Amino acid sequence: MIDYLKTIPSREEFKRLLMRLNLKPIDVIRRNEKLYKEKLADKNFTDEEWITIMLESPELIERPIVEKGYKAVVARPADLILEII
């Protein structure tokens, strides 16, 4: 388990995580965060730009994300964990 607020993943780790999730960066953004609502909601960034933004402001990364082997899920709601175990 990685606390992305304390241990920010590298760009490569984050891209690998997105592949395991089978999602784009915009799909794992916390849209209720103040930063997103006030500064990002109406913007149109590339995937690479979103990744940079999220790694610079990890509070924007949806959590918890659970990984097992080559799969991962955003565990909201928590019963989504059952998809990978």
Image (tube, rainbow, N blue to C red):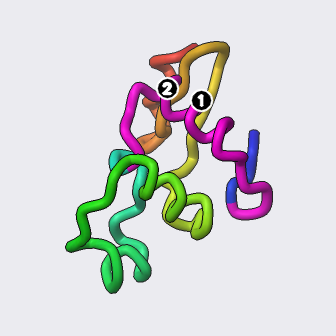
The numbered dot on residue 27 is: none
Q: Is 35 on the left-hand or right-hand side of 85?
A: left
The numbered dot on residue 16 is: 1
Q: Nearer the viewer, residue 64 or 50?
A: 50
Q: Is 18 on the left-hand or right-hand side of 24?
A: right
Q: Quadrant of residue 23?
A: top left
Q: Quick one: SS at disc 2?
A: helix
User: Residue 44 location in percent, x, y?
Assistant: 24, 62
User: Residue 4 location in percent, x, y?
Assistant: 69, 55
As drawn, 2 above or below 8: above
Residue in view at x 45 percent, y 49 percent: 48
User: Type of residue at label 1?
Assistant: Arg
Q: Is 72 on the left-hand or right-hand side of 2?
A: left
User: Type of residue at label 2?
Assistant: Met
Identify the image quadrant of the N terminus. Answer: top right
User: Residue 71 location in percent, x, y?
Assistant: 55, 18
As drawn, 74 above or below 83: below
User: Residue 85 location in percent, x, y?
Assistant: 58, 14
Does the segment drawn in magenta span residue 12? yes
Residue in view at x 31 percent, y 79 percent: 37
Q: Please identify the residue farthest to the right as the structure is shown.
A: 7
Q: Please identify the residue farthest to the bottom as the structure is shown.
A: 38
Q: CA distance from mark 2 to mark 1?
A: 5 Å
As drawn, 29 above or below 22: below
- List the residue tagged with mark 2: 19
Magenta region, residue range: 5-25
Residue in view at x 56 percent, y 36 percent: 15
